[in-house]
Image (spheres, rainbow, N blue to C red):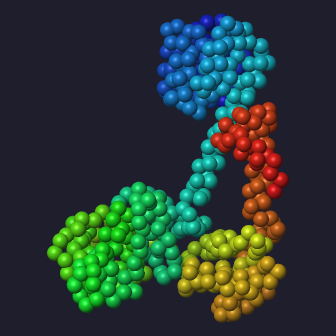
Amino acid sequence: MARILTVDDEPVILNILNKILISNGYDVSPAKNGEEAMHLLEKETFDLLISDINMEPVNGMEVLRFAREKSPETQVIMLTAFGTVSTAVEAMKCGAYDYITKPFKLDELQITVQRALEYGNVLAENKGLKERLMATNRLDNIVSESDGMKQVCEMIERVAPTDTTVLIYGESGTGKELVARALHQYSNRKKEEFIAVNCAALPEPLLESEMFGHVKGAFTGATSNKEGLFESAHGGTLFLDEIGAMPLAIQSKLLRVLQDMQIRRVGGTQNVAVDVRLIAASNERLESLIEQGRFREDLFYRLSVITIDIPPLRERVTDILPLVQHFLKRRARPDQPTISIDHEAEIILERHPWPGNVRELENVIQHALAFAENNTITRSALPPKLVESVGEMPAGESGSHAAASSQAAKFKGKSLKAFLRSKEKEYLSNVMNNLNGDKEKAAQALDISVATLYRKLSDKS
């Protein structure tokens, strides 16, 4: 039931207005003047405000401005005498939905109220849709259908805006660098550098020079001064992958940097202040390395202020097929037909244990694309070793796979793009119908330009 606040300092008009609205099934709260209306708007939420313009001491324009500030979702209809229509038009410029002249006709009042409430509902639906779309697409390139990856995304969103040091755990190929890049991309440092280094890929002398830089003559081959990664990432983010492989001697220098936010180049005597957010990652638990004497405990506590655990792909089966579609879309070219994947191949992919995680899956899809026939990835297009690892398909699927097969059949031949376009067309049509074909109001409700609305309405694809 829609809630309506009515305001008029003429008791007779207010009484008639309330009786009409109540008889139409609305929940009505009357206010005998502007001050009382503003008091109610302060405490409660209304779908619609109907206010007279000429009131004392607080007039309708003041009530309108107060309503737009306190409750922008509330639609407003102004009541005005014939001689003050210009003021009512000014009220619409200030955010009122419409105005009605006194004495008002019953059918005019009912239609205007209904349209104002429908308009408010459209705006609310549009806002909710935009919020859902933002939530769905909030982290580029991270597929998060599984509960485990949804938790990872939630952690990224909460931690990214801070400068807190983050430690990411995950098996090889789970996407630790992807998570680190997302932390950078959604932080206040996103306009600055994101620099990644694999600590396991460089020998100790080279790793020290890469991280902290060196001065000319510091060692054989140091023919000039060189700034390190900390200096290069100044203002941005430095990602240290496989930090568990970092030699103990460099760990102590890294600890000093995290404590003082200053570095000293190899062979140098001057300290250089740096402003860097550090993100580290490891495929081994650092607590275990501490017990083995391979990692400093004090550095561990500096790094693990926030810990994010990325689950392996075998524990997030619901992400497998969305990841497949993600990889297919990323490799699609405008001049090529859409590549699909048949149900048998989908089941094989879901049953494989994926020791190489997401990286292995991406490589498998790349292989399958090379052997796909008739624009379809089938069992024969998958790597033979992968098919062998799954074994023979049971004669008659049962359990969850049978249910999945039944569900998949309902969507056979329906592309996601076509489905979304159909729903968009349906939504646009509903909005236009609710607003009696008024394209300007529809564009305003949808938060798009009129030109964009025309293009979408005329789009036949």
Where is 149 relative to 73, above or below? below
Residue 137 versus residue 206 in the image, above or below = above
> Where in the figure is residue 264, as x and y percent of width and height?
22, 74
List x then y, in percent, for residue 443: 70, 39
State which quadrant residue 271 falls in. Answer: bottom left
Residue situated in front as seen by the camera: 373 or 358: 373
Image point (74%, 63%), residue name:
416
Instruction: In this rendered view, identify the residue nearer to me: 435 or 394.
Output: 435
Does any portion of residue 143 appear in the rendered image?
A: yes
Q: Name which quarter of the figure residue 114 lies in.
A: top right
Can see residue 78?
no
Query: In this rendering, is residue 188 above or below 329?
Result: above
**Residue 131: percent from left, percent from top:** 59, 49
Q: Residue at x 56, y 17 (%)?
A: 61
Is 130 situated left or right of 43 in this image? right
For this orientation, the residue located farthest to the left is 269
| Above/below status of 243 relative to 232 | below
- Left/right placement of residue 135 relative to residue 366 reads left
Left or right: residue 50 compared with residue 114: left
Q: What's the residue at 78%, 79% (across, down)?
A: 376
Q: Residue at x 77, y 65 (%)?
A: 415
How many numbered marks, from 0 up? 0
Q: Nearer the viewer, residue 430 or 3?
A: 430
Q: Position of residue 312 (x, y in %)?
A: 52, 78
Quarter that holds the C terminus: bottom right
Q: Quick one: quadrant of the N terminus?
A: top right
